[in-house]
Image (tube, rainbow, N blue to C red):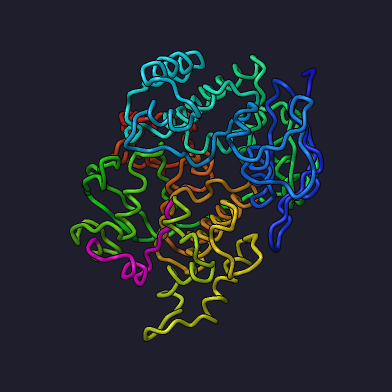
Amino acid sequence: MSDVLLSLKGLTKAYPGVVANDQVSFDIGVGEVHALLGENGAGKSTLVKMIYGLVKPDSGEMVLNGTPYAPAEPRAARADGIAMVFQHFSLFDALNVAENIALGMENPPPMRDLAARIRAVSETYGLPLDPYRTVGGLSAGERQRVEIIRCLLQDPKLLIMDEPTSVLTPQEVEILFETLRKLKSEGTSILYISHKLEEIRALCDHATILRLGKNVGECVPRDTSARDMAEMMVGTALKTPERSGRALGPVALSIKGLSVAAPSAFGTALKDVTLTVHQGEILGIGGVAGNGQDELLSVLSGEVLCAPGEVLLHGEAIGHLNPIRRRKLGVLAAPEERLGHAAAPDMSLTENALLTGSVREGLAQGGMINWGATRRFAQQVIEAFDVRTPGTENAARSLSGGNLQKFVIGREVLQDPDVLVVNQPTWGVDAAAAAAIRQALLDLAAKGAAVICISQDLDELMEISDNFAALNEGRLSAPRSAEGLSVDEIGLMMGGAHGMEVAHV
């Protein structure tokens, strides 16, 4: 690496009650894959927003290719060669690939010419895409390809990637890494944000670590263990989740032969789903995004109703009961989508605590809300799960994604459920927070709760699950003991190799 592409010098950005970035300085070299690491709330998102022109720094400066750089908006950043693939995709399901890409271009060419460019660029970088396919029918990995190709058509000097592998199978991750290595070889710089530290070690040349908004260290990932990087991020020794020996109790929740129509044209129908989870058991369910995870959680939580006897709790029919009545019986759920589903963005944390905790925590009686008790419950969640926020009256949308995730999971765990269904419980959270959430799920099972953990994080499923099943196109495989199950086997099951588990049962 001979030259510096982008130099950050003393970047500072403060919001009411918190300094998001405090005198952050580091360089990104030409043709370098540079990792940006840190806990949730460490300031990573604010920093890349300043680079991409979404946020204006209070002080400090940036220098791009030797020239002062201060983008007033993302359009200016793109014009200077800065592109960004966000963690949450910004695509329209009803439009095709080419139409979605055209919407992100300043002066899109005629659709036929654009389609040809999409085909050429996607094949060049090993990410083949049909420009005329409707986005609603694409897998999560294919949707990410759309976002990446949209950036590559800009011929960027710097590509910023935020948690790019959170919804990919191991096989898709390898394809992505080959693409990024090709871009690097051509001189493109990449700023890479991820909580998956083994990926950082495999891909990145250099890493900058943020803690509480400050640059607290740098390292060469290939020469540093994942544990050492995690401990640099949190500033203390990392605690590994511990499993306590436990005997499984009677069946807590069961479904047999359940089929449910797709909720929309872009949803996934559940097809002949059968599952059983016992008291004290953690059932891990893997699957690539869009294969029925949201639909399964909706059926279990009561958001989608079915015939009474199709869902049983301790042998009693609950398929016809709504979420409030199921919560009263002890069936709680934490969906994947944090903002808008698990939490109301513009409501305070106190109000969000009330939304799901009112029944089991006795926060409302006779039509009257006990706001004092509700604030205490919200504060209890914040303290127990180390949610970084100025206070209980801050809006949910003001939290970083990982901190909101900790609040959502903590809110359900502290209600002492009999059955807890979680989808992507550690999505976008740092190593220390992920370990704490996994330990909370293990502790809950140790107390006798039945836990269904739906996740695309294979390491997570291996670490906490007693049994494992895979969702593919709305079908659930037969469960297998998680002990001795390899990541490759799980990845193949997630990809639809349903014959595989039969041979091992």
| Lateral position of residue 22 relative to residue 148, left or right | right
Residue 158 screen position, x and y as percent? 65, 27
Q: Which residues are magenta?
A: 319-336
**Picture quadrant where residue 120 is located:** top left
Quadrant, the C terminus: top left
Q: Residue at 62%, 60% (x, y): give it.
A: 387
- Residue lying at the far front of the rendered structure: 107
Residue at the bottom extreme?
Answer: 366
Q: In percent of the image, x 32 and y 58: which residue is there?
A: 253
- Residue 183: name its quadrant: top right
Residue placed at 72% from the left, 55% from the top?
14
Q: Which image quarter is the N terminus in?
A: top right
| Residue 137, placed above or below residue 438 | above
Q: Is residue 206 magenta?
A: no
Residue 251 seen: no
Q: Nearer the viewer, residue 97 or 63?
A: 63
In this view of the protein, can residue 205 be seen by the observer?
Answer: yes
In the image, residue 307 above or below residue 415: above
Instruction: State left or right for residue 64 relative to residue 481.
Output: right
Residue 266 drawn at (x, y percent): 29, 40
Q: Position of residue 196 (x, y in %)?
A: 60, 38
Residue in the foreground of this view, choosing between 208 and 168: 208
Any magenta on residue 321?
Answer: yes
Total marks placed: 0
Q: Is residue 168 above or below residue 238?
A: above
Side of 158 where 305 appears, left or right = left
Q: Position of residue 67 (x, y in %)?
A: 77, 28
Q: Residue at x 61, y 50 (%)?
A: 435
